[in-house]
Every structure is written in C-alpha cells, then in structure tokens.
Image: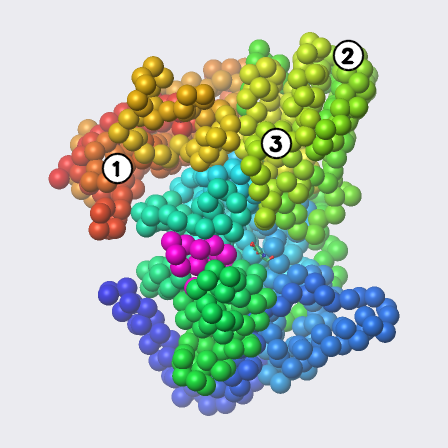
Amino acid sequence: MQEVKTQRQVEILWAVLVGAVLWAGPGLGADPVRTGGDGESAVRIENLLERMTLEEKLSQLTQRSGDDIDDADTPEARQKTEAFLATIRGAQMGSFLNVHGAERVNRLQRVAVEESRLGIPLIFGLDVIHGYKTIFPIPLAETCSWDPDLVTRAAAVAATEARAAGIHWTFAPMVDIARDPRWGRVAEGAGEDPYLGAVMAAARVRGFQGEDPAAADRLLACAKHFCAYGGAEAGRDYNTVDVSERTLREVYLPPFKAAVDAGVGTFMSAFNDLNGIPATANPFILTEVLRQKWGFEGFVVSDWDSIGELVQHGIAASPADSARLAITAGVDMDMCSFVYRAHLAEEIRSGRISETVIDRAVRRVLKAKARLGLFEHPYVDPQREAQVCLTPEHLALAREVARSSIVLLKNHDDLLPLGKDLGTIAVLGPLADNRKDPFGTWAGIGGWGEAVDVLAGVRSAVSKETRVLHAKGCELEGNDRSGFVEALTVAKQADAVVLVVGEGQAMSGEAHCRTSLGLPGVQRDLVETVHAIGVPVVVVLMNGRPLSIGWTAEHVPAILETWHLGNECGHAVADVLFGDFNPSGKLPITFPRNVGQVPIYYYHKNTGRPPADNDGFTSKYLDTPTTPLFPFGYGLSYTTFGYADLEVSARKIPPGGEVTISAVVANKGKRPGHEIVQLYVRDVVASVSPPVKRLRGFRRIFLAPGETKRVSFTLACADLGLYNAEMKYVTEPGEFRVWIGPSSAEGLEGRFEVTK
Ligand code: NOJ
C-alpha cells in the first residue's frame, strides 16, 4: 500500500511541476525542439502530448526494424526506400532497431525531425552486447575477471563507438541468471549467481550510460530480459519458466534491481511464460515489482514480437487482446509486433482501456528521448564515427579485458607458462587459425578482418628462432578424421602442442541451445589422439557455455578456458600461454561433469539427505559424483595463494548490527598475481530452508611474491536476509557460518550469531 502511494506521489509531483511551469511561461512549449532542464523537458512532453493524435501517440510506442532498407542503386530499391521514408514522414514509428552508421541514421532522423508533423526525433536501438566495432569478450567471459571497473570501461568503449555510429540505445546488459549451460544465452550474461550478477549488471549500466546518457560517448542501457528468461525448462530457449516466487526474488530479480539502482533507462520484457503469465503480459513483475516497489521511471520495450506471441502462448485470442494485455501490464513500446499501432486505438474507442494508459507510456518514451538529448541534438557527426572506432586505445583495452577473462583450469607440474624460446610449437585445432568464431554471439557489427587469432598471437609472442607449425586436425563439427594424420605429423615435431578446440560462434546465443555439453564433432578424439603421442599438450578451450570435458580434464596437463574473447583473442591467449600475463579469472558458472547433472549450481539447498559417497539413500547418482567438474568461483594462477588466520569481529551481533570477517591472503609462489578473494555465508537454521552457501562479497587483490594482505569484508544484518514464508525480506536471528576462500568449494570457516 505504502509503495503504491509513493508511485502516485511521483505522478502528482510531476503533474504539479508541469502545471506550474506551464502557468509561469505560456508559450514555452511552442517550440518543442529547444529546451533545457528537467522542468522544460516535462513541459515539452506535456505540450507534445496535447498536440498528438492518438495515432501519433501509438507510433511513439512502435519500434520497427531497419533490416529492410535497401541501399542498392536500382529503381526497385529506391522505391522501397522512399516507401520506408514515407512511413517516417507520416510518423508511423517512434524507434528503429538494426539501423546503424552515422550517415544512414542521420538520413532517417532528418525525415523524422524536419519532415514529420511534430518533428519528434527517433530513438535508434541496437544489440551492442560486447562491443560495437571493437569486440570485447562475451559477457560471460568478461565476468570471469570479477573486475567491475574493467567491465564498466569495456561497456563505455562500446557506447563510444556505437553512439558515434548513430545508436542511442543498446539492448544490454542482459542480466538473466543462468543455471543451465544447455541454454545458448548463458554466453550473454554474468552466470549463475545473483550477487555477482547484480555487481556486473550495475557495472555495465554505468559503462553504457555514464553520468549522462546524452553525452556523445554514451548510450541508454536496457536491462533484459525481464524476467527469469534464463530459467527456461530443459535449457531450451523461449521455453516455459516455472519458478517459485522465492526463487524469483532471491535469484532472478537482484541483477534487475541493481540495474534500476544504477539508473538504467529501459527494461525489456522477456519472451517466456512465467508461472503461467507470460512475462510480456505480467503485471506482477512489470508493475507491482518494477514500478511500485522499485520505483523504475524509464520505459519498458517488449522483446521482438513478444507481444504478438501472446496469442501463441494461449492467453490472447487475437492480436488486439495481446496489445491490450501487454500495455496494461506495463510494456510501453512494441518491438516489431505492430499490434499497438494496429489495435490500441480501437481498444480505447471501445472503452476497453483508457487513453491515460497510452499517455503514460508515451510520456516515458519521450522522457527517454529527452534524457538522451535528442530534441536538442538529433543528429550525429559522421566524421566522428571513423575516428573513434577500433582505435589503438580501444584495442588495448580489449586485450586487457580478454586476458583478464581467461581462466586457468588446470596446470599440472607447471607446464604453463611455456617458454618463448621453445624450438618448435605446434598450434593445432579447428579454432587455432580462426578469427571469426572467437567473436562469439552478438558480435555487434565488428568485422573480424582486424581480429587476431591464436596462431597469429603465438607467432607474435615467441622468439625469432622458434618454429610455429600449424594443422587444423578437424572441423568444428562432423565426423571427418582425415586431418588427424597431418595434425599428428606436426605434433610429433613439436616441443609443445597448443590445441585450440571448442565451440563456434553460432553454437551459442539466441535459439542456439545444445543437449550435449561435450566438445562437438570429433574434437575430443583429436585431443585424445594428439595427447597419446606424449608431447606436452595445452588445451585452449573456446566456447560460449560451460563444457563437460571430463576426459580432457583428467588427462591433458594444462587447460585454459578462453571463451569467445573477441578482437584481441590471439594476443590475450598468447599473453597467458607465455606468462606475460598471470591468469586470474574465476568461473562465474559451474562446469558439470556431464549433462545429466544439469542444473548444477553452488547456491543449492542441502536437502534432507545431502549426498554422501558411501551411503545408499542420499541425494546422489549411481554413475556420476554429485560434485561439479569445476566449481563456481574456481580458477588457478601461475602462483599459489595461501589463506590463513580468519577473524570474525564479533561472536554475536545485535539485529541491525554489522560484522567484519577477514583473512590473511599470501602469495606463496614466485610470480606476482591477482587473486579473487571470495566471501560466502550460510544461515544455519532459518524459517525457510537456506542455501548451503551464498556469495556475499569479493575482492580482486594484487600480491607480489611473498606479500601478504589481510582482506576484510563487512556485512550488515540486511546482507544476511531471506524471504520468509510471507515473502518478506528478513534477517532471522541465529547462527551463521562464513567462509573466505578462493572458490565456492574451499575456504576458511568462521561463525557468528545474530541475536534476538
Ligand atoms: C531478440 C532478443 O531476445 C533480444 O535480446 C534482442 O535484444 C532483440 N531480439 C533485438 O535484437
């Protein structure tokens, strides 16, 4: 009730402000294009709303794709383009997606601003997910850095390049928690954990939007896909999601809330059905949670045709029903269903919805345009586009992010780093001499022509005397083993083999799910065959999801998880292979031993019969251990870190109090390195069954050889809470266990109590 009031108060204040300014300055709204601060924006928006026809309002709520603009110099193409421009002139949409390039954007914008009746600028959106021209690692990889500042800087570069190319708005960050690696879109998010996911969501929003999204190097961000899209049954994209309200609140919502707190400008509603009410028509999440509880003031765009798809979901009998359900639930802009424009006028005329619902949505869209400064600066400087894209500074940052994203999974007998002066190195595998696949899913409009592959990276790193040999061995997919002979011939001449295997660009991403998590095709056979000759082998994995690589993990001495690293892939991999960079990445998602363990994540409940290897009736499998292949938070370094001397500031803390937990971390090896120190907690007895561990803090620290640091975390009582049976967030008194360690599976343990 209280929250509803707050929302109303905001609306009343807004109306009072608008009224006051209108009263004080009649005529101020006469020129909608020249204004300054928030008050004036409000006036302009109200003024525009008064002058807009219902059709014009619905157009502001309509987004169309520019995929079909044809640049060819033929009469048909010109006719098609002219028809297209006529729709802009007639103000039939408020936004475009998939149009980029300064010249092209300006051309369309000019028609909207100078030739349409009210001159309202268009907002241009694009999926700028991990870079525009300069391609950074996929978001899952970037998250392995556990370095929010670095992630912010990468997003800022993406924003700089995209804005220069006329883009105002990115459909990112994707903040969906993903616990099922079969789902192709795990690549786009920050992994399985709500705490890490929330930190990364805020970091990306800060990077895209900066202090002011109107700046020439910033974009408006979009938190997507609201919500629980990653919970798709069986890891199959778009599939049904049925999660408890507790899991929704504990696991899926926190990154979205963090995005709101970071000031994100827009949200995107998800494709999926959520507990029986598709997310795009779900008033609980779109209005009760997002607006009334969180106070979000930006606008919500649907996903592509997700409004039209309410018919297929079986909750709408017609496109008109879909439109009414979505707008009343709280979706402001229709991406490519075109049902708002086609049906909402009739819904209003027939009294099924009120025009105030439309006005509210239009107001939100116009506010976003004002926030972007589009009324003052609708155009973009075409000179800037070429100047800011793919600069040496951007590529240098891409290299830094890429090498910080690499996770060292295994390094038996310190095989790595390799010497740069080895006599012969064989660089093998279908991804070794390959610049395109490491771009990963949603690679912006990056051209992989400028990218560096692993073979080139190795060549540029080793001494002049070192021979670098290459053979592909096999394709990414298929059964053809005919290339094995050449691979073996090359490997036999080498002092070490770097074997680059994994998934191609198109094996993850939207609608790209897999039921097998092994290496595709005959790649695993290639690994076995090459390993059998006895030359030291380093496997470099490239993939968009966790893979089940049990055989490789058991037999091959060194494994680097490099994901899809983008432009600077080859340099970054070589930096790590040869020790110019000491790997520090840690996994943001659990690696299963086999697909049958899925979903597997560290943040699970204990059950009444926790797994015990030697006990029959426990929660376990007959054919596979219950533990993961590699746990959440895991990653090695070329040095070793020791943890000692855990201290908890108080044995008992009062309700509302704080506790500080600290431990001494030491670099016990011979190389300087970064360690990601993690803090986990467990509520021992609660009114609802608690998870066995929850990440509640982390620090990325640097230690020289022999150096030690005490690393401290302060937790407030509120950090220890849970949703009780009434779905209230409370911290219950009682015992808590706490760990500081290098992963979710290890750590020094302490205890404290929250008193009554
Ligand atoms: C569908 C995807 O689900 C969404 O993430 C993306 O932003 C839109 N298409 C627009 O390309």
Between disc 3 and disc 1, the foreground one is: 1
Asked whether residue 407 is drawn in magenta, I would say: no
Asked whether residue 280 is drawn in magenta, I would say: yes
Indicate if the residue with disc 3 has its beta carbon within 8 Å of ligand 1.
no
**Would you say 79 lies left or right of 660 here?**
right
Q: Amino acid at mark 2?
A: Lys
State the residue at coordinates (86%, 70%).
Answer: 74
Q: Which residue is mark 1?
A: 689
**Would you say 518 lies left or right of 192 here?**
right
Q: Secondary structure at mark 2?
A: helix
State the residue at coordinates (66%, 77%).
Answer: 88
Residue 401 visible somewhere in the drawing: no
Residue 412, above or below 222: above
Q: Which residues are magenta?
A: 265-281
Residue 70, by quadrant, is: bottom right
Q: Secondary structure at mark 1?
A: loop
What whole-number distance in Å separates the C-alpha atoms at marks 1 and 2? 56 Å
